[in-house]
Image (cartoon, rainbow, N blue to C red):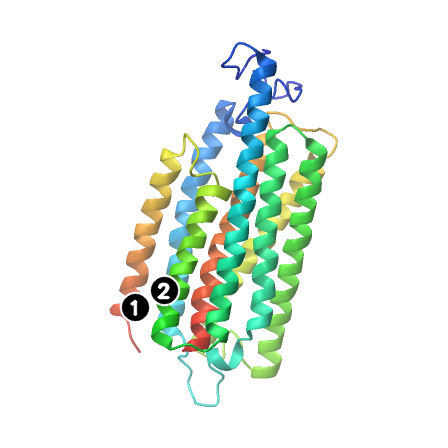
């Protein structure tokens, strides 16, 4: 029981290694968060500054996509091992989502 | 490995949320649910985009008359920060530190309620100052369905996290409740993912027309 997850045969060393790894993960999360805040501020500033519509629309959409990738891969740990099935589910969902929005924007009008 | 077994930080598994078969199944099942939620929200976004600014007469307020950036910015910061605090909570969960996990979850909940308060204020403002209601126009219906559905998710997430915190307050962490905490935090992140698109597509893009 003592070495459920041990891969070094030395539980204490293994424990310290895991602590360090998880602290590194945490630093990465904080960096991710800082960048997300930064992107959000830029997006709001671009709209506030009143640039041309044809610059703002693709620009803020791009920033949103980058933010969501950060959120999924770092905050929701999709970058970790053992996330092949979640990736399959999410990408399938995103594909259908994209098709739905495309259809509503092109086929439907009032 | 019994689910109720007592652990120490040294014996706590590396991925406690997937250390039991039940945990593994929940993990897979929950991601399938999130894939489905993506499609659900896409249909609401698609409806909103198709019906945006569809009002019966010119005296109805349009998107650019309604939205105010400072409030939306504040809501975004609240939700984004709460996403980080729930990451902190999961960091302490993985280190088998129950007290710190509970503390960060509590901060997450407080930030979540802050967000919800802003949203209630916002909707109230639109209804009373602009006569922009669920039934006033197709634009109103699509707007309140999309943003309100997200608000409903926030509310559900808050009560979910509170229920877990209260139920396990005296139990501490074990392999039975670790997956529960982990999934609640995934759900909370997903709410933030949806909000990123709401503030971009509805508010920011709504402001520029």
Q: Is residue B8 above or below residue A49?
A: above
Q: Are marks 1 and 2 on the same chain?
A: no
In what element is the residue under mark 1? helix
Q: To which chain does the residue with label 2 belong?
A: B
Question: Would you name the residue on which mark 1 appears?
Answer: A105
Task: Please give left or right for residue B82 compared with residue A38 in the image.
Answer: right
Task: Please give left or right for residue A39 compared with residue A59 in the image.
Answer: right
Image marks 1 and 2: residues in contact by CB distance under 8 Å: yes
Q: To which chain does the residue with label 1 belong?
A: A
Residue B68, position in %: x, y? 56, 75
Residue B170, position in %: x, y? 75, 31
Work out whether residue B190 can be spotted: yes
- Residue closer to the observer: B39 or A53: A53
Q: Image point 66% across, 43% down: which residue? A: B105
Q: Is residue B83 above or below residue B7?
A: below
Marks 1/2: CA–CA distance: 7 Å
Task: Please give left or right for residue A88 compared with residue B169 in the image.
Answer: left
Question: Would you name the residue on which mark 2 appears?
Answer: B46
């Amino acid at each position: 029981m003592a070495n459920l997850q041990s891969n070094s045969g030395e539980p204490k060393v293994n424990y310290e290694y895991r602590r360090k790894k998880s602290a590194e993960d945490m630093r990465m999360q904080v960096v991710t968060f800082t960048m997300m805040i930064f992107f959000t501020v830029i997006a709001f500033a671009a709209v506030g500054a009143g640039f041309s519509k044809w610059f703002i629309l693709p620009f803020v959409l791009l920033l949103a996509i980058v933010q969501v990738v950060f959120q999924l891969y770092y905050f929701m740990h999709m970058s970790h091992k053992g996330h092949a099935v979640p990736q399959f589910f999410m990408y399938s969902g995103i594909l259908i989502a994209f098709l739905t929005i495309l259809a509503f924007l092109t086929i439907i009008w009032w | 490995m019994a689910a109720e077994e007592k652990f120490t930080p040294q014996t706590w598994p590396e991925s406690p949320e997937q250390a039991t078969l039940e945990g593994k199944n929940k993990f897979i099942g929950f991601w399938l649910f999130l894939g489905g939620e993506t499609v659900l929200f896409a249909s609401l976004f698609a409806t909103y985009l198709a019906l945006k600014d569809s009002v019966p007469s010119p005296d109805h307020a349009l998107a650019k008359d309604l939205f105010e950036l400072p409030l939306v910015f504040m809501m975004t910061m609240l939700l984004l920060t709460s996403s980080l605090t729930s990451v902190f909570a999961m960091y302490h969960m993985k280190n088998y530190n129950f007290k710190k996990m509970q503390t960060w979850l509590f901060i997450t909940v407080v930030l979540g309620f802050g967000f919800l308060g802003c949203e209630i204020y916002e909707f109230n403002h639109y209804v009373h100052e602009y006569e922009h209601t669920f039934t006033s126009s197709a634009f109103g219906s699509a707007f309140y369905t999309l943003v309100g559905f997200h608000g409903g998710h926030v509310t559900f997430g808050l009560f979910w996290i509170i229920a877990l915190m209260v139920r396990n307050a005296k139990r501490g962490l074990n392999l039975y409740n670790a997956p529960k905490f982990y999934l609640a935090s995934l759900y909370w992140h997903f709410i933030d993912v949806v909000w990123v698109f709401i503030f971009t597509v509805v508010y920011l893009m709504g402001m520029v027309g």
